Image: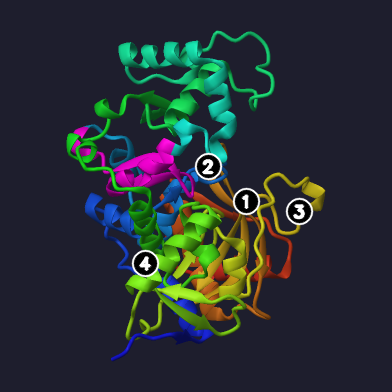
Amino acid sequence: MPPRVSFSQPEARRLALHAQGFGARQGRHEPRHLLAMAERLGALQLDSVNALARSHYLPLFSRLGGYSRNTLDQLAWGKGRQRRLFEYWGHEASLLPLSLEPFLRWRMARARRGEGIYRQLARFGAEHPTRVAEVLDHVRRGGALGAGSLSTREGRAGPWWDWSEEKMALEWLFAAGEVTVASRRGFERLYDLPERVFPAAVLAQPTPDEGDAQRQLLMHAARALGVATERDLRAYFRLSPSDARVRLQELGEEGGLLRCEVEGWAQPGWCVPISRVPGNVAASALLSPFDSLIWERDRAERLFGFRYRLEFYTPPARRVYGYYVMPFLHQEALIARVDLRADRAADCLRVHAVHQEAPRLGDDALHALATALKHLAAWLGLAALDVQCARPEGRVLLNAIRLNDEPL
């Protein structure tokens, strides 16, 4: 059967959801299952916002259900052979499979040269070589340490995001691959030398040239996205437009990727050669604002007709949907937005607002949303679910939760 070169909107959604791991078997929570999903996605975005849980935990919960976050911690920051993920700049700051480390060394080399997004860090390194050398020596002699343990600053730091000079030095060394993140203390990075953190087998792998590395990253992005525009593909691992255009042309000529048409898309799509579209994706899931299914907002709008924007930093009076809003995926559509907060002091998950996308949330969708909220509260270790939404959707959801006989 020849490869497909055009897709309808429903087919494109199905390709994307299948590629992103939705519809996976729930309850498979051993390290190998979490690692397989992390490798499939390629990047778990890190972020400091902690209204429910740190963002890197949520995508695996959305796909696999209530796993132990300690298992992911061991994969990311464990000792020896337990460590299978590492921190670096993937799609923003991310947890990435160790298998991708060789394909990001070109980015580290560019950081050392001060190219691209690293110019400001590199300028600091060029202007403060003694401080950078001192910080690196501290890491060599002292092992894993955070910026706070080195800081000699008194008062504000000045123009560097209010970072101390020691923090700036560590961030430059991290971007350049001279140090890596060994572990975390709370959410603070603790840095150490790569040879004391990564398995020797990873460091021994040959360094591919830039072209091959970027092609591999684009192929990984294509497999993780299902079908995507050039912009979608380069954004997945933050390649520059000029690099991505050259590599996509090469991949197209080699046959690794195919140009395709998607109903309603103004730009052509790209996909790996496939002969058929996967079947229906039966999944109901609350999505992190930083989930890789929706982190490119234009793509979410093209795929689902769903316009999504973060409102963390919007003044409360100007927010449309709320502070921490999770889209709700059900039956291959994003049908609602739920503003949630974990209230640890009261031991409950608070539902501040529910906004439906469809004209009406049917009984099946309401039952699925009620179940998803109960599962989320249980995974977070919260004893109760408190619906505070005064909107009509909130009252209907509260009734559905009461009718849902699944225990919390």
Q: Mark 2 or 1 closer to N-term?
A: 2
Measure the C-alpha gap from mark 3 to mark 4. Answer: 35 Å
The residue indicated by pointer 4 is 223
Kind of element beneath mark 2: loop
Magenta-drawn segment = 80-109
Of marks 3 and 4, the one in the foreground: 4
Measure the C-alpha gap from mark 1 to mark 4. Answer: 29 Å
Q: Mark 1 or 4 closer to N-term?
A: 4
Measure the C-alpha gap from mark 2 to mark 4. Answer: 24 Å
Label 3 Cα neighbours within 10 Å, binned few <14 / some 14-19 / many ≥20? few
Amino acid type at mark 3: Arg
Q: Mark 3 or 4 closer to N-term?
A: 4
Amino acid type at mark 1: Tyr
**Res 348 seen here:** yes
Of marks 2 and 4, the one in the foreground: 4
Kind of element beneath mark 1: loop
Q: Residue furthest bottom?
A: 1
Measure the C-alpha gap from mark 1 to mark 3. Answer: 11 Å
Of marks 2 and 1, the one in the foreground: 2
Residue 47 disc label: 2
Q: Mark 1 or 3 closer to N-term?
A: 3
Q: Mark 2 or 4 closer to N-term?
A: 2
- Residue 195 lies, in percent from the top left, at 25, 28
The residue indicated by pointer 3 is 319
Q: Quadrant of the C terminus?
A: bottom left
Amino acid type at mark 4: Arg
Above or below, comparing residue 305 to residue 31 in the picture: below
The residue indicated by pointer 1 is 324
